Structures are given as C-alpha cells and as structure tokens.
Image (cartoon, rainbow, N blue to C red):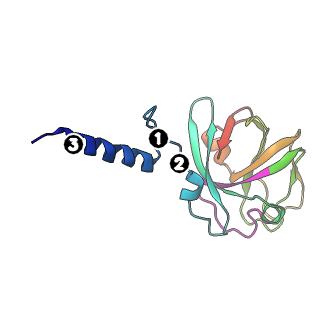
Amino acid sequence: MNKRPKAIALSLLLLSAFSLSGCNARTGETAATDQQSALPLSEAGLKQVPLSVQTSDASHAFIVEVAENSAQQARGLMFRNKLADDKGMIFPLPEDRLASFWMKNTVIPLDIIFIRRDGTIESIAANTTPYSLDPVLSNEPIATVFEIAAGRAAELGIEPGDIVTWQ
C-alpha cells in the first residue's frame, strides 16, 4: 500500500487545523486571539480587557472594565460594594487632558492612576476617600485613568513612570 496519499491527506488536515486555529503557516506562530471577545461582559454590562502594569521588578495582571462612553465614565465604580484585587476600571479619554475625578456615590476607597498617552504612569492618587466631592486631579494632561482597590498600587510597588498596557 502506498503511504504517500495518507501522508498528503494528513498534511492537508494539519494545515487546515492550523488555519482554523489562527496559526500563521509561514511563521508557525499563532495569531493573537481577540481576548476582548473571549472575556465576558462584566456584571455591570461593560466590556472587559486584560491590562498589565510593568513595574521595575514585576508585571502585574488585571482584568479591567472599560468605561468607553460618557455615561459609563460618569458612573464609573459608583455604588459598588467591592472590587477584587485583580480587577479595575479604565477610562480612556478621546484626547489628552487634565483629568478630575471625584468619589461621589463611590462606596469603596480606590487608587486612581493617571496614565499618559505613551502608557507611563503620570501620578497616583492613593486611598481616595469614599463619597468625597473633592476633586482628584492629574498633574498634567493624560490619556487614560485606571482605578483599582485602595492600597493595591503601594502593595504591588506601582509607581509613577511604570508602564501600563491594555487591549
């Protein structure tokens, strides 16, 4: 029996499997999967994406809700009773600007991290006060705001200048 037809059939089967799985046949690398679609919507119905913070000695992973529009950004994390250590929320801004946040109707204390367009952390407002109407300000125009549970930035060694990336 000739083994060549079986070998060709097996090769074609493997090639189609690679094509369906997103593998690049030329390089053998798998194409980046759309992790955004792989994550379910949050309990609040917001899109979730992976985010990482690269400090001087480690990388810290979070799953964050994305407050994409003005209504979502106005609500933010208001009325939430808890925020897991590996969770957070980001507020991407359409253009760089000085940012001002408050804690009105925000039950839990937060660390508010201000991020420049290049992904570097501009400043951190640590342990913000729940329900406070006092503005929490960035020091310069920024592109994104990232909120996490109060105390996490210090606990993880997250500091101004560290790099934040998200999808």
Local crowd at mark 3 within 10 Å, few (<14), some, or many (≥20)?
Answer: few
Q: Vertically, is 143 above or below 39?
A: above
Q: How many marks?
A: 3
Q: Which residue is mark 1?
A: 30
Looking at the image, tell me whether mark 3 or mark 1 is earlier in sequence order.
3
* Whether residue 86 can be seen here: no
C-alpha span from label 3 to label 2: 33 Å
Determine the secondary structure under disc 3: helix
| Disc 3 + disc 2, Cβ < 8 Å | no
Instruction: Please give the range of residues in magenta.
Output: 75-92
Local crowd at mark 1 within 10 Å, few (<14), some, or many (≥20)?
Answer: few
Q: Find residue 40 and report its image quarter.
A: bottom right
Between 29 and 47, the one lying in front of the other is: 29
Query: For the N terminus, which image quadrant?
Result: top left
Task: Write the residue at 26% across / 45% down.
Answer: 9
C-alpha span from label 2 to label 1: 8 Å
Q: Disc number at residue 33? A: 2
Q: Residue 63, image x and y in percent?
A: 60, 53
Left or right: residue 98 compared with residue 33 = right
Task: Write the residue at 68% across / 35% down.
Answer: 163
Disc 3 marks which amino acid? Pro
Closer to the observer: label 3 or label 1?
A: 3
Task: Write the residue at 79% across / 38% down.
Answer: 117
Disc 2 marks which amino acid? Thr
Q: Which residue is mark 3?
A: 5
| Disc 2 + disc 1, Cβ < 8 Å | yes
